[in-house]
């Protein structure tokens, strides 16, 4: 009994995916340091907890909704799509995924209220939009090709990076906006590729994300364009003197990005052959975020 409860609770969190929020928060921290702000450790810990709990919430609510609609019973799981299968294996404990999602969302909201008390109501738009994305993603956003494409990028890019920077500095900045464009484009790409394996099942369930709407071939082109725009954002930030020259170290990942793009292009119709490139894409995103954060902080001290 306890094992099934634990399995559903932890499975619905999708723990391996939770490495992404810390790298996005790290970008916001780097921006705050570059602005020569003193970092409040308590605030840093709280913003990290809030970001991770928001991700847990959207994951758990997604697992619960996909089980209730029967979608999870039809998908073939991959390391990056198809659900954890924790609920189908323990259907009597499905409510624990819902509880996990709600509790995590409440925790995120409470942390948001604290920061609004500390920093003011200018944080409210970030909080409201974040909650809307978490709550609406599975049931409504996945029915709109454009919203489904950009919502993950907005959440992990603009909201997490700019929100973190605001919490730590008390102000929004063009530097935080430019930096947030990198995870915006890369995380949009992450979810875009993750939708490839489940196109047929998602279509039957009433979803209409971009791979369903325009097909894989067009999405591969868009994937390549978004990769280019992510790196262009870094270069643009440097040219506008919003970022230090050291931030260009993150362009190193453009080399494997080209390899990944051609791999995705070649194997888009073969999911088993595509999966390794989906994994490489995850590594690409995390490494780019880490290198960009490192480069920004490097520019402050050297």
Image (spheres, helix red, strand yellow):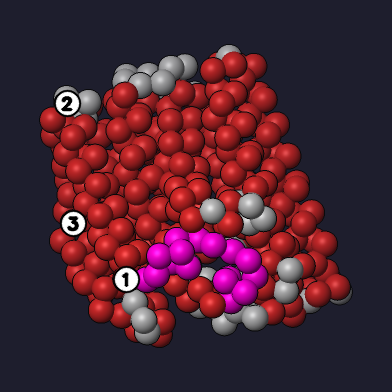
Tell whether 166 sits left or right of 283.
right
Question: Is 25 a magenta residue?
Answer: no
Q: Nearer the viewer, residue 82 or 37?
A: 82
Task: Characterize the local packing of mark 2: few (<14), some (14-19) or many (20 or more) Cα atoms within 10 angstroms.
Answer: few
Task: Characterize the local packing of mark 1: few (<14), some (14-19) or many (20 or more) Cα atoms within 10 angstroms.
Answer: few
Q: Nearer the viewer, residue 285 or 148?
A: 148
Answer with mark 2 or mark 1, whichever residue precedes in sequence. 1
Find residue 26 and name its label.
Answer: none
Q: Which residues are magenta?
A: 201-216
Residue 172 rendering spot, x and y as whole percentages:
41, 21
Task: State whether residue 3 is above or below residue 149.
Answer: below
Q: Which residue is mark 1?
A: 217
Q: Nearer the viewer, residue 212 or 270?
A: 212
Measuring 35% from the left and 52% from the top, which residue is drawn there?
A: 186
Q: Residue furthest front?
A: 213
Disc 2 element:
loop
Tell whether 123 sits left or right of 263.
right
Residue 254 rendering spot, x and y as whole percentages:
18, 56
- Quadrant of the snapshot with the N terminus: bottom right
Answer with mark 1 or mark 3, whichever residue precedes in sequence. 1
Measuring 65% from the left and 24% from the top, which residue is drawn there?
A: 114
Find residue 240 and name its label.
Answer: 2
Question: Is 212 a magenta residue?
Answer: yes
Residue at mark 2 to residue at mark 3: CA–CA distance: 21 Å
Q: Which residue is mark 3?
A: 254
Answer with mark 2 or mark 3, whichever residue precedes in sequence. 2
Task: Please state which of the two labelled residues, at mark 2 or mark 1, is closer to the viewer.
Answer: 1
């Amino acid at each position: 009994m306890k094992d099934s409860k634990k399995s559903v609770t932890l499975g619905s969190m999708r723990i391996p995916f939770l490495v992404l929020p810390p790298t996005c928060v790290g970008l916001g921290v780097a921006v705050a340091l570059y602005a020569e702000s003193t970092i409040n450790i308590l605030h840093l810990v709280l913003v990290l907890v809030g970001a991770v709990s928001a991700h847990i919430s959207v994951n758990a609510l997604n697992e619960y909704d996909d089980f209730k609609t029967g979608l999870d019973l039809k998908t073939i799981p991959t390391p990056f799509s198809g659900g954890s299968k924790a609920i189908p294996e323990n259907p009597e404990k499905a409510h624990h995924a819902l509880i996990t999602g709600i509790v995590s969302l409440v925790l995120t909201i409470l942390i948001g209220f604290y920061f609004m008390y500390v920093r003011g109501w200018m944080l409210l738009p970030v909080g409201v939009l974040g909650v809307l994305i978490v709550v609406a993603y599975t049931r409504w956003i996945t029915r709109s090709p454009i919203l489904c494409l950009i919502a993950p990028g907005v959440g992990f890019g603009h909201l997490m990076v700019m929100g973190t920077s605001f919490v730590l500095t008390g102000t929004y900045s063009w530097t935080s906006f430019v930096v947030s464009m990198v995870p915006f484009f890369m995380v949009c790409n992450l979810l875009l590729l993750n939708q490839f394996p489940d196109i047929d099942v998602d279509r039957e369930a009433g979803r209409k994300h971009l791979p369903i709407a325009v097909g894989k071939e067009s999405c591969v082109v868009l994937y390549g364009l978004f990769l280019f725009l992510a790196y262009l954002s870094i270069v643009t930030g440097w040219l506008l003197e919003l970022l230090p020259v050291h931030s260009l170290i993150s362009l190193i990942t453009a080399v494997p990005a080209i390899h990944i793009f051609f791999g995705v292009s070649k194997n888009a119709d073969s999911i088993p052959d595509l999966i390794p490139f989906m994994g490489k894409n995850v590594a690409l995103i995390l490494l780019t975020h880490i290198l960009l954060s490192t480069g920004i902080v490097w520019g402050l001290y050297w």
